[in-house]
Amino acid sequence: MLALENGMPMYTALGVASSGNILAIIANYWFGYWLYDKTKTKLNSSKTGTKSLEYGHKYGYFILFFSWLPVIVSPLKLVAGVLRLYSVWFVTIAGSCSEARYFFLAQII
């Protein structure tokens, strides 16, 4: 937003913001992927953990379409890594939703 207000071209600002966001998406995914290795026995042994994993695998990709919401995007990325969702689809869905958010915000300014 500040870059646009200071005269940076819109597509340059969108490219820089999207690149940083894609890197954050990948970093959070791999952190969640690593976190699953540390917590898998606890998740699989509890009833709540097992049910959460089932719901996550069933609805995980659909929930990623809410990744344009600024408040819940980081936890969603982490959970996607824990669920071990397919990384190419994850980055595509979460990245495009975040880029769309940036594009609409840039249009408002």
Image (cartoon, rainbow, N blue to C red):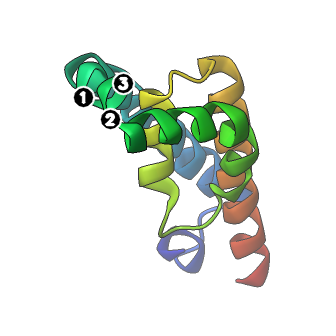
Q: Which residue is mark 1?
A: 42
Residue 70 at x, y percent in the picture: 52, 67
Using the image as rendered, state which of residue 45 and residue 40 is in the foreground: 45
Above or below: residue 88 compared with residue 46: above
Residue 108 at x, y percent in the picture: 76, 83
Query: Contact (CB < 8 A) between labels 3 and 2?
Result: yes
CA gap, disc 1 to disc 3?
6 Å
Residue 10 shows in this picture: yes
**Circle 3 SS class:** helix
Query: Contact (CB < 8 A) between labels 1 and 3?
Result: yes
Q: Callout 3: few (<14), some (14-19), or many (20+) C-alpha neighbours within 10 Å?
A: some
Q: Which residue is mark 2?
A: 46
Q: Callout 2: few (<14), some (14-19), or many (20+) C-alpha neighbours within 10 Å?
A: few
Residue 46 at x, y percent in the picture: 32, 35
Residue drawn 63% across the image and 30% down it: 57
**Circle 2 SS class:** loop
Identified by mark 1, the residue type is: Lys
Query: Contact (CB < 8 A) between labels 1 and 2?
Result: yes
Residue 61 at x, y percent in the picture: 72, 37
Identified by mark 3, the residue type is: Asn
Residue that sits furthest to the left in the current view: 38
Q: Which residue is mark 3?
A: 44
Identified by mark 2, the residue type is: Ser
Residue drawn 75% across the image and 62% down it: 103
Residue 25 shows in this picture: no
Q: Is residue 36 left or right of residue 75?
A: left
Above or below: residue 78 compared with residue 29: below
Question: Which corner quadrant holds the C terminus?
Answer: bottom right
Using the image as rendered, state which of residue 83 and residue 109 is in the foreground: 83
